[in-house]
Image (cartoon, rainbow, N blue to C red):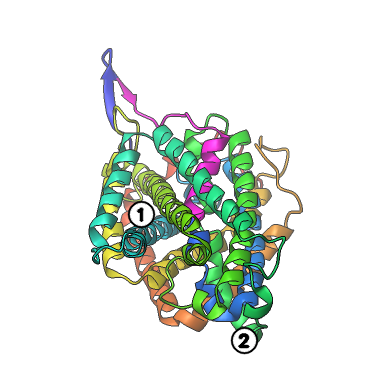
């Protein structure tokens, strides 16, 4: 439930502003994900070797292409804040919607924690490498970064995503410039693929294990759906911004792998303590490139954290507005028109994880929550097409080849669960247990507060079969 203001004696709901276009959607999706090209993906190299990580990159790229296609159709039709949560309300039911909302909030909040941890630690590393200063504590820089981004999100979505567009474009440009700087047209001069690359050191089981961190190349592109209620033209902006963002990420992922494993030994790239492989690759080449990739990595981490604050707060706000959570969280700021209470509430959670939990574990928590959300999408797509067949309602976009993308997505999700279990079985089981417990809490306690009839905001005909 949003806050109310009184205008000429009549109460009026305060809603989110519709101010975003395709470029902002691109900036939201790519901004969240691009940090995965600068850090995190390299743990896949440690699992399966350099070629194993490349295979994982393209297999998971197929998974996310299916995600983008499915999301583009449903979200351009269900144009409401909350993204996949809003989809679940209309197509599946309250319990699924509650869980999907939590998947989104935890995936983005954990990703945000990883981003600001990397930003703080990179400041520490940069001070040692380029300034030769005494060691500095990274924690204050992490908190400072989080505080500035929280303020930016508090003040308005247009300014937030405009900033994201600029710094995301700059970070992507740094990857492209590094690619040309290592002279790919002259193998052996800087790039040493023949000397550094090996086969599959851990066999095909290692390739499957690499799928776990291969997700980090793309995790968060589905966050474009969170802007559905704030775009001017959902039927145009969401599919265009999401699909162009996916193409951008596929290019960036290929360039990232090619440069990193051509300059650094794969054992070093996949090392558990390796924070920023592109930055370290640039150090090998020249000081100007080192400075460029330092800035690019910082920008990518900031852009990702910025988008995560936006997305997590929209999901939390939507759940509060529908009374899946206390209605207090469903308030919109009367001046800035942002879900300010949801923003403020989630910031300390991200800070605690960033300061207390190792990076690989934070990444795993985010990946698992995201993976659970992707597993819901094939079910959602099937029920959406069955209840409202083509022609029964107006769609902003219709994805081709149905039901093939849903089948491929479900198959790849199941395979990736196995990949996560190989390295982080305890975390996987703990996360499953957590979601079972909160599902029971919702079913036996919170559901009584939900106003079931108020959730269906789309003016659609009765579903087929009902």
The reply to whether the C-beta atoms of the residues labelled 1 and 2 are less than 8 Å apart is no
Indicate which disc, 1 or 2, sits on the residue closer to the N terminus: 2
* Boundaries of the magenta span: 11-34
Image spot of residue 60 (x, y percent): 62, 65
**Vertical relation: 380 (above or below) 165:** below
**Residue 250: quadrant of the picture:** bottom right
In screen coordinates, is 91 left or right of 10? right
Residue 240 seen in this snapshot: yes
Which numbered mark, 1 or 2, is in the foreground of this view? Answer: 2
Residue 239 vs 350, above or below: the answer is above
Q: Residues within 10 Å of mark 1 (few under 14, many from 20)?
A: some
Label annotation for residue 447? 1
Label 2 packing within 10 angstroms: few (<14), some (14-19), many (20+): some
Pick out the residue farthest to the right. Answer: 401
Q: Is residue 191 left or right of residue 315?
A: right
Q: Is residue 225 visible?
A: no
For the residue labelled by badge 2, is the local secondary structure a helix, a strand or a loop? Answer: loop
Secondary structure state at the residue bearing disc 1: helix
The numbered mark at residue 387 is none
Q: Is residue 383 above or below residue 364?
A: above
Q: Is residue 455 left or right of residue 50?
A: left
Q: Nearer the viewer, residue 441 or 140?
A: 140
| Residue 149 horizontal/vertical position (percent) | 33, 45
Q: Quadrant of residue 301?
A: bottom left
Image coords of residue 69 (percent x, y): 66, 50
Mark 2, residue position: 201
Q: Is residue 288 above or below residue 260?
A: above
Magenta run includes residue 29 = yes
The N terminus - image quarter: top left
Residue 133: x and y in percent read 26, 62
Which residue is depicted at the point 58% across and 52% down? 177
Front one among 132 and 175: 132
């Amino acid at each position: 439930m949003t806050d109310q203001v009184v205008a000429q004696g009549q109460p009026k709901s305060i809603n989110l502003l519709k101010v975003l276009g395709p470029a902002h959607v691109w900036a939201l999706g790519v901004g969240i994900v691009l940090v995965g090209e600068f850090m995190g993906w390299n743990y896949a190299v440690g699992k399966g070797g350099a070629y194993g990580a490349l295979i994982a990159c393209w297999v998971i790229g197929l998974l996310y292409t299916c995600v983008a296609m499915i999301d583009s159709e449903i979200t351009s039709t269900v144009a409401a804040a909350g993204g996949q949560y809003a989809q679940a309300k209309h197509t599946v039911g309250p319990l699924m919607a509650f869980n999907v909302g939590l998947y989104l909030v935890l995936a983005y909040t954990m990703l945000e924690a990883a981003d600001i941890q990397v930003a703080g630690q990179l400041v520490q590393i940069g001070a040692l490498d380029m300034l030769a200063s005494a060691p500095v504590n990274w924690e204050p820089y992490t908190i400072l970064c989080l505080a500035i981004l929280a303020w930016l999100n508090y003040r308005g979505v247009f300014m937030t995503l405009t900033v994201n567009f600029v710094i995301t474009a700059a970070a992507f440009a740094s990857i492209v410039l590094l690619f040309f700087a290592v002279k790919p047209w002259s193998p052996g001069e800087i790039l040493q693929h023949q000397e550094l690359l090996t086969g599959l050191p851990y066999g095909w089981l290692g390739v499957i294990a690499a799928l776990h961190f291969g997700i980090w190349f793309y995790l968060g592109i589905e966050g474009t759906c969170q802007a559905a209620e704030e775009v001017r033209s959902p039927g145009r902006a969401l599919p265009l911004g999401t699909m162009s963002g996916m193409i951008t990420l596929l290019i960036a992922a290929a360039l990232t792998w090619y440069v990193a494993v051509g300059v650094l030994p794969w054992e070093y790239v996949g090392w558990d303590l390796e924070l920023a492989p592109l930055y370290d690759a640039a150090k090998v080449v020249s000081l100007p490139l080192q400075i460029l990739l330092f800035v690019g990595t910082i920008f990518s981490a900031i852009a990702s954290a910025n988008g995560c604050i936006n997305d997590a707060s929209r999901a939390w706000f939507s759940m509060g507005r529908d009374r899946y959570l206390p209605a207090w969280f469903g308030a919109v700021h009367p001046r800035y028109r942002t879900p300010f209470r949801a923003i403020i509430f989630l910031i300390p959670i991200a800070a605690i994880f960033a300061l207390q939990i190792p990076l690989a574990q934070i990444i795993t928590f985010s990946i698992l929550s995201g993976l659970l959300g992707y597993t819901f999408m094939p079910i959602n797509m099937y029920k959406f097409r069955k209840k409202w067949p083509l022609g029964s309602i107006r769609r902003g976009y219709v994805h081709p080849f149905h039901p093939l993308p849903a089948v491929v997505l479900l198959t790849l999700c199941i395979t990736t669960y196995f990949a996560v279990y190989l390295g982080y079985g305890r975390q996987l089981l703990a996360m499953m247990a957590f979601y079972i417990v909160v599902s029971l809490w919702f079913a036996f306690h919170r559901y009584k507060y939900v106003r079931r009839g108020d959730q269906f905001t789309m003016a659609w005909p009765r579903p087929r079969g009902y």
